[in-house]
Each structure stands twice: as structure tokens, then as C-alpha cells.
Amino acid sequence: MAAVLAARSHATRHSLAFRLRRVRGNVLFALALVPFVVFAAFPVYWMFVTAFKQVNDLYNLSNNPILFHLAPTMDQVDYLFQKTNYVTWFFNTVEVGAVVVIITVLICVPAAYVLARTRFPGSASLGIGIFLTYLVPPTLLFLPLSQIVVGLGLANTKWALALVYPTFTIPFCMWLMMGFFKNVPREITEAARVDGCSRLGAMIRVVLPVSVPGILTIVIFAFTLVLQEYVYALTFVSSSDEKMITLGVVTDLVRGDVFFWGSLMAGALIVAIPTAVAYNFFMDTFVKGITGGALK
Amino acid sequence: MAEIARERTMGHHAVGRRLGHLLDGEKIFGYALVAPAVIYILLLVGYPFAIALWFTVSDATVNHPIGPFTGLKNLAFVLDDDVFKRALANTFIFTVVSQALQMVFGTGLAFLLMRRFPGRRLIRGLVMVPFTVPIAIGAMAWNWMLNPTYSVVNWMGTHLGLLVPPGPNWLGEETYAMISIIVVNVWRNLPFSAIVLTAAISAVPQEIVEAANLDGANWWTRWRKIMVPIIAPIIYIAVLFSLVFTFTDMTVVWQLTRGNPVNSTHVIASYAFVTGILSGGLGRGATMSLFLFPVLIVGAIVMLRSLKSRELD
């Protein structure tokens, strides 16, 4: 009996010490993680609070700013939709995004296909060369491009952006697409060729149908890259009704020295949430693409 | 004769087949399908770059884009401009300090995120948010958080006893404005560093680490002799991208300070924007932008070497 008790108490002591150590480990872990989460996500929470606060609450310095003291309101959102061109900016973004996506897919997919699947003189250098243009920043080319846009009669229109954006969506999406095509088994093209398909036919009838997930990924990426772009949008477009959504939100809701913070943050939030969701979904693909396939 | 007749009866179908046949040569097929991409990039990256080079040696303005040749006058002017010199220094400071902080905190965050815990996906999603939100919008949120009157950062800082009330005027004083820009850059890029590091570290084969453990290697030796050599090529490219993007970015600075107070926080890109677009001095602005180019060249070379070496494997 005594022996059993001793054994049991020994066991509990052991597990208690073990559990304590584990609890301490978890607490330390949480303490280390929480600052990162707060740092990363607080600005978005703050956008949310700002967007839905009543003005009297937002600008009352005696209140705790991170909580609601008056009932949340839709006033700022209403202002955004009724007193600004927000809806126009939204449709501008959709139109420009659609054109850019179409150009990108039409140009990237065939190029990526041949660069990934066939060898011809210069194919390797061409692939790397096109990818490297992704490193060329808007801030290097915005001055000459602003003149080219004027020359083409696209000055101060959203179509200037539709023309220029593929310069960065093509390199990136082509690189991603090359990765997808490399993973399509060679045998299926060979089988199609034996059956009498031309090279073009094999690509269109056999490889493209199995690459739909890849194509969808580049569609999403091209669109989010368009949504995030700022420098060309700021440089080429100044009329309010030609603006893209991101630019419109951060420029038109500042009138002189007056910032319409509530509406600004509401407009920002509406753009930020879908982008964040789309990106999170494809984060790993994005990283794989940007590290040039260094990750398997 | 009969042949022509046959072709006629077969109509456009034959033309299509002939095209298909012509395209069947591996070379022609390859060049034909790459050509649109190459042409697009030559016209809208190569050609503007050539114009940018011409701008730097001419007196081009928005009203007279085809200005007279002026040789190195723009360069001399730009190098003599104190604001530009400051912008050049700032660009390096912002890029290097942000990158260093990102790597240190990114490694920490990567190890935290590798652990399995309940709600890991949600936490990971929250931590990734800054990288996914368009940066112009993220920077605007920070501008509001650092507002001189309503700064929530100052409110929290003073209530936690970390800041002396009323707290600094973050965007209105030189040093604080520079700190703010660095913080926002880190905020933006930390998720990217962390996720690349996580992926890289998980790519290290567990057997090698265990073998080293059995051989009695301590964590520092394990890290330096096993982890670093394996993850280096991946980190290399990620750092390169993040360096190039931070170095050439003007969005954070523009949304936070517009280069103020008194032009002390400009970077190359934002000052080139002010000079070239707002003041219309295309020649001078393009000359400033061209200072971004050497960094890109170095980046491109590093990238090329790493891609080539991988192809040899």
C-alpha cells in the first residue's frame, strides 16, 4: 500500500513538473508571438475602428481610442459611396484589371509553355531575361513612360495603366507559369504528338486543359498586382473619375489639409480585405515564384 | 494544277494546317510563342529605358520633352543638390536598416510559426496581413496612427508608460520621421522574410539535423554548418527581392511624409518624382532615377549566378 502510494505520488510529482515546464514553455511561446501579431494586425484593427466610429467619438481625445464609446455608424461608408467617386474607382479597377489579365494570360502562357518545354537557341537566357525585368522598378521608368503615354494620347486615362501594368505582370506570371508547365508530364504531349497533333495542337488540346489551376493562379496574381500598384497610378492619372481604387482612396479623401479619416479607412478596408484573403490563399505560390523556384 | 484545286477546296483548313506545320519546327514554334512577350517588354521597358538615358543627358522638361543635348550638366546639378544627397543617403539607411531588422525578427517569427499550436492558420494569416494589404493603404493607416493630434501609438505608448506624454510628433520631426519610415518598411516586409525563412528551414532534411545531433553538435554549430548552407540560396534570392523593392520604393515615404519635414526624409524615388513629375524637370528627375540602376544591375547579376548554378545541379 505504502509502496503504491509512493509510486503514485512520484508519478504525479513527475507529471506535475513536466506539466509545469510545458505550461511555462507555452506561456513564453505566447509572450513571444503576441507582439508580432499585434504589430502586424493592429493597423487593420485600427482601420476598422476608424471606419465605423461616429465623428464625435473618433475625435474625442478623452476617450480610449481603441474602443467604441458611441454606437458604431455607417456614416463614413455612406459618405464614401455617395460623396466620392468610389464606385467609379471600383469599376475602373475592374476594367483595367480585366484588360491587364487578358494581355498577361495571352502573352505569358504561350511564352512560358515554350520556355519550359522546348529547347531552342537562346531559350534559357530568354526565360531568365524576361524574369529579370521584374526587378525593374516603376520608379526607374515612370518619367519616360509618362511621355510615351502622352504621345499615345492616353494621358490622364486609366488605359495608360492597362498598357503599362503588363510590364510587371508578364515577367512574374510567366515565371510562375513556367513552373506549372515543367510539372506537366512530358509523356502526355508526346502521346498527343504520336497521335498526329501539331506542337500547337498538343499545347492547346492537351497541356492547357490540365494547366487551368496554374492559369487561374496567374489571373489572381495579375489582378492583385494591379490592385496594389501605386506609382504609375499616381504618375499617370490625376482626374478623379479615371483613378484606380487604391489611388482614389488615398488621394481623394484628403482635401487640402483635411483628411476624411473615417471614409478613408472604410475605403481602404474594402480594398484590403479581399486582397489579403486572395494573397493568403496563394502565399506559398507567391513565395515559390519570387524565389525563382529555389523552393521545391 | 490539281494541287491548287485541292487546296482551294480544302479552304482555310489547309492554311491552318500549313501554319501548324510551319510552326512545327521546334525553333520557329519557340520563337513565335515567345515573341509577343519579348516585343511587349522591349517596347515598354527597353524603349522607355533608352528614353530615360536620353533624358539624363538633355534638358528635357514636361513642356519640351525633346530638349537640347546638355551632356553631364544634369548629373552635375543633381550631385550638387543637397536634398538629393540626403535622399541618396536616406535610401541606403532605410534599405539596410529595414533589411537587417527584417532578417532578425523574421528568423524569430519563422521559428515561432513552425511550431504546431491551435489556431496556427489564423495566427499565420494575421501575421501575413501587412504583406497582403496594398502598401499605399497600409502606409496611410500608419499615417493616421502617427497623426500629431490623434496618434493611437502615442496613446498606447503613454498609457503603457513607454512614452513621455504627449509622445513624439512622429512624422513632423526628422529623426522620428525616419524611424517611422523604417518601422513601416519592416511592418510591410517582415511577413515575407518570415515566410521565406519558414519555407527554407522546413526544407532542411530532418535526418541531417538528427545525425548532427547524435554527433554532438551544439545548436550554433548545427545552425552555422548545416542550416545556413542549405537555406542560403533561398534566403539569398528573397533578400535580393526585398532589397530591390525597398531600395526603389517611394510609396511608404510618399504616404507618410512626402519627404518632409523640410525635405529631410526623401528617398531617390520620391525626390525623382517631385523633380520630374511635380516640377516637370524630366532630365533631372531621370538622372536621379538612374541612381537606382547600379543596385538593379548587382541584383540581376546575383540572381543570374544563382539561377545558373541551380541549372547545373
Image: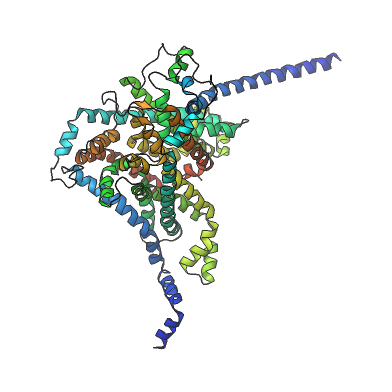
Does any portion of residue A293 appear in the rendered image? no
Q: Nearer the viewer, residue A115 or B210?
A: A115
Viewer-proximal residue, B189 or B281?
Answer: B281
Horizontal relation, residue A202 to residue A236: left or right? right
- In the picture, measured across the screen, residue A5 lies left or right of residue B154, that is right
Where residue A74 appears, as percent x and y from the top left, is 51, 30
Determine which quarter of the picture holds residue A254.
top left
- Identified at 43% across, 17% down, the residue is B154
Q: Is residue A141 above or below residue A76?
A: below
A7, above or below A191, in the image: above
Which quadrant: the N terminus of chain A? top right
Please tell me which residue is depicted at 37% across the width and 42% down the height of the picture: A241
| Farthest-out residue, front | A82
Position in image of residue B91 (x %, y %): 30, 31
Say whether residue A66 is visible: yes
Q: Is residue A285 above or below residue B251?
A: below
Left or right of A151? Residue B21 is right
Q: Nearer the viewer, residue B42 or B312?
A: B42
List the single residue furthest toward the bottom: B1
In this rendered view, identify the residue nearer to me: A92 or A282: A92
Residue B123 picture location, percent across and down: 56, 31
Quadrant in the rendering for residue B255: top left
Whole-percent x and y of residue A117?
Answer: 46, 59
Number of marks present in the image shown: 0
Q: Residue at x 42, y 85 (%)?
A: B5
Q: How is the image coloured?
A: rainbow
